Amino acid sequence: MSLLRRNSWRYLLRHPAQMLLAILGVALGVAVMVSIDLANGSALRAFELSSETITGKATDQIVGGPNGLPSALYRQIRVDLGLRLSAPVVEANVGLPDRPGRSFRLLGVDAFAEGPFRPYLAVGSSAANLGPLLTQPNTAIISFETAQTLAITTGDTLEIRVAGVRQPLRIVGLLEGGDELSRRGLADVLLTDIATAQELVGRPDRISRIDLILPAATREATLAQLRAIIPADADLTTPGARSATFSQMTRAFEVNLQALSLLALIVGVFLIYNTMTFSVVQRRTLFGTLRSLGVTRGEVFGLIISEAALVGALGAILGVALGIVLGRGLVQLVTQTINDLYFSVNVQAVDLALWPLLKGLILGLGATVLAACVPALEATLAAPRTVLRRSSVEERMRRLLPRTTASGVLLLLAGLGILQIPTRNLIVSFSALFAILIGCALLTPAVTVGLMQLMRPVFGRAFGLLGRMAARDVVAALSRTGVAIAALMVAVSVTVGAGTMIGSFRQTVVQWLDTSLQADIFISSPSLNATRTDVPLDPAVVQRIVTTEGVTGVTTFVGLQVGSDAGPTNLLALQLANDPRNRQALTFIGDSDAAWSRFISGEGVWVSEPYAYRTGRGLGDTLTLQSERGPQTFPIVGVYYDYASDVGTVTINRATFDRFWNVPQISSMAVWAAPDADIDALVTRLQTNAGGTQDLLIQPNQAIRQATLEVFDRTFAITAVLQVLATIVAFIGILSALMALQLERARELGVLRANGLTPGQLWAMVLSQTGLMGLTAGLLALPVGMILAVVLVFVINKRSFGWTLQMQFDPGLLVQALVVSIVAALLAGLYPAWRMARTSPALALREE
């Protein structure tokens, strides 16, 4: 090992705390990023595995419309067309009443047609014995792992909820996948005979889809034959296309989380820069001596970069390990959000995909080395005699300050300019946001100098000489304090920006709920998706509700998914009660009266704002929907504000709907009561009259309001976690900077102690300095946070989800951010102050 390497190792071993803080900063930044990638990937991988397990080796699928497909179509395809490689499937999502949040994908199959598609279900397969499904009613098979999780075995009864009705199923067999992926894919599959599934979903002689295996040579000709005989509302598609549709739903959600996760890594880069700069400052005398003795600039540069690479490698490895642990917790938050907003998915384990782990290692190591380049260049570009001077770094910092400030202004303007580009690309939008953020960070040192000039006389009058010294020392050590303040400013500003965005969003949702929840009571059956009510109500139950004493009117809804020329579409058919309050429930973009009159007369459909944005369809455009009578084109006569889902909804008059779809059922109801009615008493009567055959949610509008806000809060819980983690990284940055100052100023503090400065006064001076750093970071974070909030509300949110939000500024949040910034800095200053106060003047004076 060379002399330089040995010297480097000795330095690292003599300063373990400094290196540990740097490693921890990198590790936390990498951990946040890796955990988000793993959580997102695990949720989508679980859905993909489940879909692949269910679709098996099918190359194509005929997917039915709202009413499914007639069983006769399967016989026609298999017998008349001679497509023996075909299999009928009944599919539905079912819940477990005794385990809220747990769901299954009900799969009803024809055991004799399954062999080519799903080998683990083939007759005679060792993996499953399907005989009991064919001979015994109300029976099912689940995976061996799921049975262990639910603590049930063969012969036990499992109660499920399907279409709001509780149904007991006897478990008559257990499936065992041949490998780990198969076992994970089978984890949420509930297998029954196709006849049993038809009875459970209440659709005798109807199937959900037909799976096909078509030879490549004759595929196109066969598809043409199939298109000629399938129902008008059926869709001839591929399994991959269906999975891609679901993945696209969550794309904006994933990108937003990934962008937030990068924040912690960016703050970590500031920390690394601070640490490596200080390591150079600590050894400037040594580097000056080495340069004087003939060591080249390249050797010094390589030494510093190799140290940074070691820190980055250790931090990245630790970060990946922490990310796996953190991902196990975050995956539940991500899964809950996907279940609430998009589709049902069960995630039993974190999917340790290789790419997120490699990305964490590469970015962690790369960011560390990149952050170390500036201090490494500073150590190599200066002449030996300059390096030997203690003040050289600060002199260089003062010389570079105008350039740093100019770079910050240019980045800030560039970010604002990029935001003007009319694009929906979220990568471009977040790049602009990060450019603004980094630009503001580069402006921090210059603004800090100005603020300290203003605060020095104020602190001098308040705290005397020690107060003036504290303000002076912040500027005197700007090469370290400036970076630490910038790191804390970035973390706190993002907290302010994200908090303001979330608060604005929440207040907008509250106002929307106050407007839209005009009816007194809302009735639906429990659904696996918080934003969809597509479970049909029992017609007998509907009739009993309508005739309940105290009910003056009922608005009914039916929700279903149909095909359209804009892709899969959530369609809501609306039959309005004769109540004038109906018109107050929706707020339209444009002429509200025209939207209502044209809708009621059946001239066209409404679309929600997110749907209009996502599909590029607005007022006056047309939309073609796949109905049972073939494609039907409707003009869009109104665009309304809606915050239930970013996927969006098309709303159609029930009378118009009934002309093209034969779907007589109702999914949910809004009940209107007399103005002076006792709502609680009416809820009790409705529960009594409607109870018995179907599980129902009968809730007054205040309960719906509360439940909606709970879904909202769950959605943004993960954002709060990311903000806390970024602030922790910034806290470590402040602590690292203060420890560096304590070590570098040992002689100065020794002189002060020798001249009568007491330990208590030293404590006061150090904490005043850290408090000033926190105050400066907090004051800078407020305007920067407001800029970020405006970008998040009016640009990022709009381009991600299509919502229009009303900006709401919360003074309490601003005060809280300022307090957090100051308290974080003061806490970070406790240990360095304690170390400084304990060091004897004689020892400090000897250390130089």
Image (cartoon, helix red, strand yellow):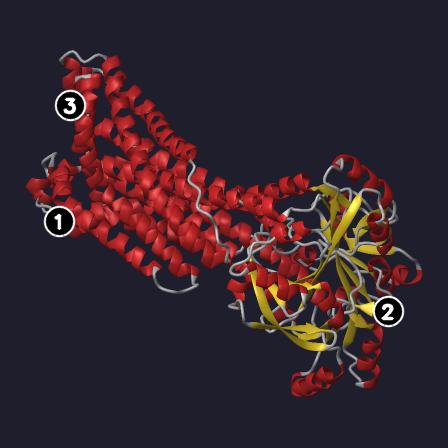
Q: Is residue 108 depicted above or below 350 in this figure?
A: below
Between the residue at mark 3 and the residue at mark 1, the CA separation in whole angstroms equals: 27 Å
The residue depicted at 70 percent of the width and 80 percent of the height is 214
Amino acid type assigned to the residue bearing label 1 in the image = Leu
Q: Which residue is mark 3?
A: 748
| Left or right of residue 195, residue 30 in this image | left
Q: Is residue 13 depicted above or below 523 in this figure?
A: above
Furthest toward the right, the residue is 135
Residue 411 image-quadrant placement: bottom left
The residue depicted at 86 percent of the width and 69 percent of the height is 205
Q: Which residue is mark 2?
A: 205
| Left or right of residue 419, residue 2 in this image | left
Residue 61 image-quadrant placement: bottom right
Between the residue at mark 3 and the residue at mark 2, the CA separation in whole angstroms equals: 89 Å
Q: Where in the figure is residue 13, as x and y percent of width and height?
A: 30, 34
Amino acid type assigned to the residue bearing label 2 in the image = Asp
Between the residue at mark 1 and the residue at mark 2, the CA separation in whole angstroms equals: 82 Å
Q: Please tell me how crowded label 2 is: few (under 14), some (14-19), or many (20+) other residues with Cα within 10 Å.
A: some
Q: Which residue is mark 1?
A: 381
Tally of numbered tags: 3
Earlier along the polypeptide chain: callout 1 or callout 2?
2
Mark 3 or 2: the one toward you: 2
Amino acid type assigned to the residue bearing label 3 in the image = Glu
Q: Secondary structure at mark 1?
A: helix
Q: Where in the figure is residue 220, as x and y percent of width and height?
A: 65, 86
Mark 1 or 2: the one toward you: 2
Earlier along the polypeptide chain: callout 3 or callout 2?
2
Quadrant location of the N terminus in the rendered image: top left
| Left or right of residue 335, residue 360 in this image | left
The residue depicted at 29 percent of the width and 24 percent of the height is 832
Q: Is residue 113 depicted above or below 263 in this figure?
A: below
In the image shown, does 548 or 788 lie closer to the viewer? Answer: 548
